[in-house]
Image: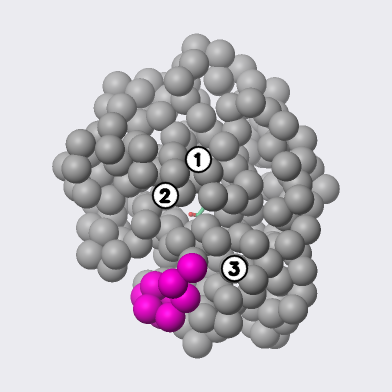
Amino acid sequence: MSIPDKRAKLDAVFALAPVIPVITIEDAAHAVPLARALVAGGLRVIEITLRTQAGFDAARAILDQVPDAVVGIGTVLTPADYERAAKLGAAFAISPGLSIELLDAATAGELPFAPGIQTSSDLIACVTRGYELVKFFPAVPAGGLPALDALAGPFPNVRFCPTGGINAGNAAQWLQHRKVVAIGGSWVAPAADIKAGAWAAIEQRAREATTLR
Ligand SMILES: O=C(O)C(=O)C[C@H](O)[C@H](O)COP(=O)(O)O
């Protein structure tokens, strides 16, 4: 697939919902009820991180059993992670950062990829290769909205998915920025609620998140 085609696919995914729940799952058996709760609440795009062993199995279960969910693989750190995400049939891959090796693998591959950035040098590496939708991580510790606004200036074509330190209290402010396509965060489905099977609470938080923009 060409770079513009992959870019268009990624844009279409990020247009589906204002908030992307970032999920860290310890037990793959939780994946399907969790995804059903998020979809029922109106958040179809879900980032399953590879922070835990269960990440891939969780993503596979959702892909198999929750057709309305749009599954992205997060914490993609290496070309091998990217390849695995592509083989799994995920909708996209996303990273908290970037390396040239990772960008090159994603350029050669078929799966749309959103690199993570924190500096203008990161953004130069991205735009040089045609990546124009990036995760801004960690959004709040790295300077918050003023930092994003400053970074956006020299890169007029870049759009951002800020993640890291965003919650129900500050999410709306981030979503008002014209270069923010969506925000990511763990607050919609925190680890404790997943562990406890608190699906109704997660569904309710998802529903509230859909009204933030
Ligand atoms: O694990 C990854 O791949 C990441 O990119 C990091 C996560 O997106 C953030 O850690 C979520 O941040 P919180 O919403 O503040 O919990």
Q: Which amino acid does label 2 sit on?
A: Ile
Question: What label sits on residue 94 in the rendered view?
Answer: 2
In depth, the one of 51 and 190 nearer the eye is 190
Q: In which quarter of the image is residue 176?
A: top right
Mark 2, residues whose alpha carbon is within 10 Å: few (<14), some, or many (≥20)?
many
Q: Determine whether the residue tagged by mark 2 lies in a helix, strand or loop.
A: strand
Mark 1 CB in 8 Å range of ligand 1? yes
Determine the residue positioned at 20% across, 47% down.
Answer: 109
Q: What residue type is labelled 1?
A: Lys
Magenta stretch: helix, strand or loop mostly: helix
- Where residue 73 sits in the image (x, y, percent)? 41, 59
Which quadrant: the C terminus? top right
- Where residue 104 sits in the image (x, y, percent)? 21, 38
Determine the residue positioned at 49% across, 66% down.
Answer: 69
Mark 3, residues whose alpha carbon is within 10 Å: few (<14), some, or many (≥20)?
many
Q: Name the residue under label 1.
A: 135
Q: What residue type is labelled 3?
A: Val
**Magenta-drawn segment:** 60-68
Q: Name the residue under label 3.
A: 39
* Residue 141 higher or lower than 16, as above or below: above
